[in-house]
Image: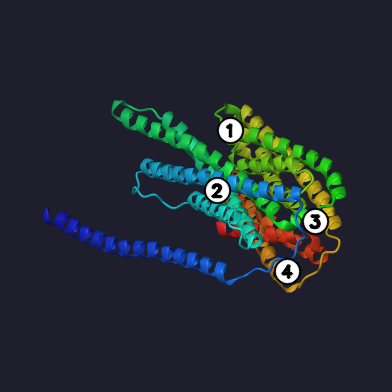
Amino acid sequence: MQEQPNLQNEMQGGEIRENFTTKLVICSLMIFVPVTACLAAVVAAALLDRLIVVSQPTWPQYSRDQNKKYRANRLGLTVLAAIKLFSALCALALAVFVEYEHQLVSNKSLFVLIALDHIAALLTIVSAVVDLHSAIINKQSAANYKVAIGMSVIAAVWCLKSLDIEMYPYYYGDIQIWRAVGAVPRNGTQTLSVYGTVDRTYLIIIMEGFLVVLFAVLFGLNLLSAVQGSKCIQYEYYDEDSMIRRNVSLQSRCLGLLHFIWGMLLMVLVVLGLIEVPWNANYIGADLMWLAVLLFATGILYITHSGSQLSIHFLLGFICFTCALEKMCSSINLTYQSATYPAFIRGPQDAFLGRLVLHSVQLMILFLETLTGFFSVMIYGRALKQRYRQAVKYSTCMHLILLLGNMFYGVVLVGCNVVFTLVYWLFSESLVEIPFFHMGNGLLVFGISILQALSLCYPALLLSVATLNVIAASVALFM
């Protein structure tokens, strides 16, 4: 009887040794291949910087005021890059710590898994380094600024989407776990271990809260550095129409104030979804955090840059419009199920009314934000047409390729969302928030394909469409 367990232990030990060798080889390859690719990318960037020369147009001579403005913009970009670099390093360290604590609580192997928030922090670090390079080195400055703007846009998208998935399901789920563990009855032998789990989970919640704030700040910093980089490109000083600026300035401030108000109201719903009260039932609210941060940033930018940066205003208005429209459609489903699902109707009356009221308020706010975003698109689209009346039309081949690609992505994501919702209705399942679809933003990418088609007739939209294609690629890469 004793020989059989020993034989089993020896067999298990042999399997573990074989698996250990295989895992070691795979892990070594996983380290070697990215390091090699990173070194190759660094060498390629250095060679491209030496081999490629970007032709510079002949600009008029700077006036004294324009020279001061240009230097101030470069200094501002340098300061923003330094702040962004420090904040991203803090976010990376905090993300590693939170992931390690999660592994301790889950009693799994004590490895730090590479998650999306780690990659978002690393992208922000790279973006900050590129910003510093473009602000300090004068060689091919226009090309460097454009690369810096592109990297800032990619990092901003990843920070915002990491904020989305960090809030729900992770932060929201950790709060629910902490409350559930704290409410479990325990005897004397379980008290020490349960208290240890509660304390560790509470620490994770606090650190995750700081991490969420850091990603919101990093999104704002990436957005500001993209705006600051566009200010450093020389043609900005010679392509401004003072009449258009005066006409748009007041409208921009009003729209910015509305975006800011809707963002504040969404933030209130986020807090109401996280607190523990009997009438909020299973209302989530945490999945609105990323949209609230986006509206905050849009409102502040509209107010502080009311008469300039028309392409960025149009771009942000379009993003707010499509994202709010997508979330509004989802909220219609949530409101309908809150009012008609049998289990909710038979449940406690205060929970039923609270859930229904919260979803109805959420739907109303998103409807108002959709209208605000729509008016933003109309106003800034008209201003762009007036500013770039003599825009030159380009080849339609690349436009058609990007249009079809974005349309396919948008149709697939929106179609999957609709099909899953109909299946839930068919089987009378309760409402379930699926982060996959909120991460995909299919309606945003589908809207980009429509805007791509419009840019064939209105070349003034080309700059915004090019930036939106970078955003679509970043969202697809995040998936």
Camera-side residue: 334 or 178?
178
Please state if 145 lies on the left or on the right of 313 as rendered. Answer: left
Question: Which of the 4 image quarters holds residue 196?
Answer: top left
What kind of element bears circle 3? loop
Image coordinates of residue 170 in percent, x first then y, are 50, 43
Rendered image: mark on residue 162: 2
Q: Earlier in the sequence, mark 2 or mark 3?
A: 2
Rendered image: mark on residue 456: none
For marks 4 and 3, give the CA distance: 25 Å
Please state if 300 lies on the left or on the right of 343 as rendered. Answer: right
Image coordinates of residue 154 in percent, x first then y, are 60, 55
Amino acid at the residue labelled 4: His
Q: Quadrant of the C terminus?
A: bottom right
Q: Earlier in the sequence, mark 1 or mark 4?
A: 1
Rendered image: mark on residue 281: 1
Q: Earlier in the sequence, mark 4 or mark 2?
A: 2
For marks 4 and 2, give the CA distance: 30 Å
Q: How many marks?
A: 4
Instruction: Give the crowd class for mark 1: few <14, some 14-19, many >=20 residues within 10 Å.
Output: some
Question: Which of the 4 image quarters holds residue 218?
Answer: top right
Image coordinates of residue 393 in percent, x first then y, are 80, 69
Viewer-side label of 1, 4? 4
Amino acid at the residue labelled 1: Ala
Amino acid at the residue labelled 3: Asp
Q: Which residue is mark 4?
A: 399
Viewer-side label of 2, 1? 2
Q: Which residue is mark 3?
A: 239
Give the vertical position of 446 relative to 175 (above or below): below
Q: Residue pushed farthest left? A: 2
